[in-house]
Image: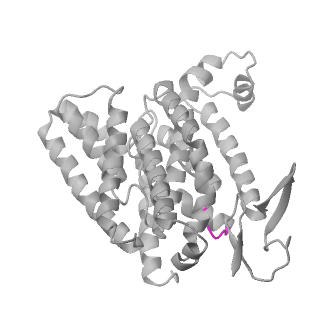
Amino acid sequence: MSAVETGPAGGGRTVPAGARPGVRPAGYALVRAGRGAFLLHRRATVVAGVLAVLLAAVCVLYLSVGESFVPPGEVVRVLAGQPSPDRLVVETLRLPRMTLGLLVGAAFGVAGALIQTVARNPLASPDIIGVTQGASALTVGAMTYGVTSYAVLPYLSIAGGIAAAALVYVFAWRGGLHAARFVLIGIGFAIALRSITQLFLTKGDYLVAQQAQVWMTGSLNGRGWDEANPLTLALLVLLPCMMWAARAQRSVALDDDTATALGVRLGRVRLGLVLLGVVLAALATGAAGPVDFVALLAPQIARRMTRTAQIPLLCSALMGAFIVVTADLLARKLFAPTELPVGVLTAAIGAPYLIWLIIRSRTGGKA
């Protein structure tokens, strides 16, 4: 018999039978809150703090840099609600776009962490297993047939992503969810849906095709509170689900026999985690388009930094937000006055990383 102790930041640890009550796993600190207590992974906590500081710094830099430079001190004054001559530039022109980038990056980061946890494969992310391709296919198809309102397209993106994920899940299910089969079927669906999207592009007129191409690269240009506010509300509604997922992913990380012996209903837990990950990815795609590779990169970088048994959701969210905001800052300035879509920068970073992951998996982690 064994018992499982869990902590909110790092992951579960199996404690051998006969271990003394109160003995903490290595690397964990016991935090008491009122009458309760919980375990906190020390390294994951430090990494989360460092990422939060770095994210705050890049946000101030993002709001400072543009066609006109705003001193960081003035940016801080505006954010603190104090009077400033640069309030219009910071608060009206730059803050909405940056806020959307933060939310999109965090949603993609958590979505990738959940799907990689269930698939037990670092290659599994929404943009690899067909979720974002499903969102793209339905959105571009709607554009082709005359639906161009940005009040409607995000909802179509969400519906397309969920439908694609449901198909992948159904076809991958054979009395259980095998990780390799899940990823391979997802890749197959992604290729098929990308072909359907290209077919829609050839059917639409030139202007619609141009509009669809810009959306498909994933861009924050021209986006603001109209996209950020609904996404904020959706993430707040899903926050209890994410807190549940932070605990549930530890049971999924156990082998099937151990989890079943502990009374974990693996099928339901996996379905819940995948569904939450798909919804988060679809929401982010609907707000900014398919910003590729963020859901692939953020969880893996976070896991390597924290060295935890499971992928930490909070660090994945912070890393995803950091990647998107930094990439959008570079996209705005590298070829100014021309602005690149943020998806171009994330793809330039993510594609080599994906190749490295594939080579590493073929060499047994020696690359």
Expressed as whole percent of the image width and height from the top left, the position of residue 161 reads: 35, 47
**Who is closer to the viewer here, 220 or 29?**
29
Is residue 181 shown left or right of residue 94? left
Residue found at x 61% / y 22%: 91
Quick check: can you spot residue 67? no
Question: Is 339 left, or right, of 235 in this rendering?
Answer: left
**Residue 146 seen by the camera:** yes
Residue 178 appears at what percent x and percent y? 39, 73
Instruction: Tell me which colouring the rendered structure shows.
Output: one colour
Q: Relative to 236, is 134 above or below?
A: below
Front in this rendered view, residue 66 or 283 = 283
The verdict on residue 11 being magenta is: no
The span picked out in magenta is 307-311
Tell me where residue 277 appears, x and y as whole percent. 47, 52
* Quadrant location, the N terminus: bottom right
How many marks do you count on the picture?
A: 0
Report the magenta stretch's main SS.
Answer: loop
Whole-percent x and y of residue 260?
Answer: 54, 73
Most extreme residue toward the left, as rendered?
Answer: 203
Q: Residue at x 45, y 29 (%)?
A: 223
**Which corner quadrant of the image does residue 174 belong to?**
bottom left
Q: Is residue 232 above or below residue 317?
A: above
| Nearer to the camera, 223 or 276 | 276
> What residue is drawn where x is 54% and y is 52%?
110
Q: Is 153 left or right of 78, judged from the image as shown?
A: left
Q: Quadrant of residue 44?
A: bottom right
Name which residue lies at 49% across and 70% down.
120
Q: Name the foreground residue: 170 vs 66.
A: 170
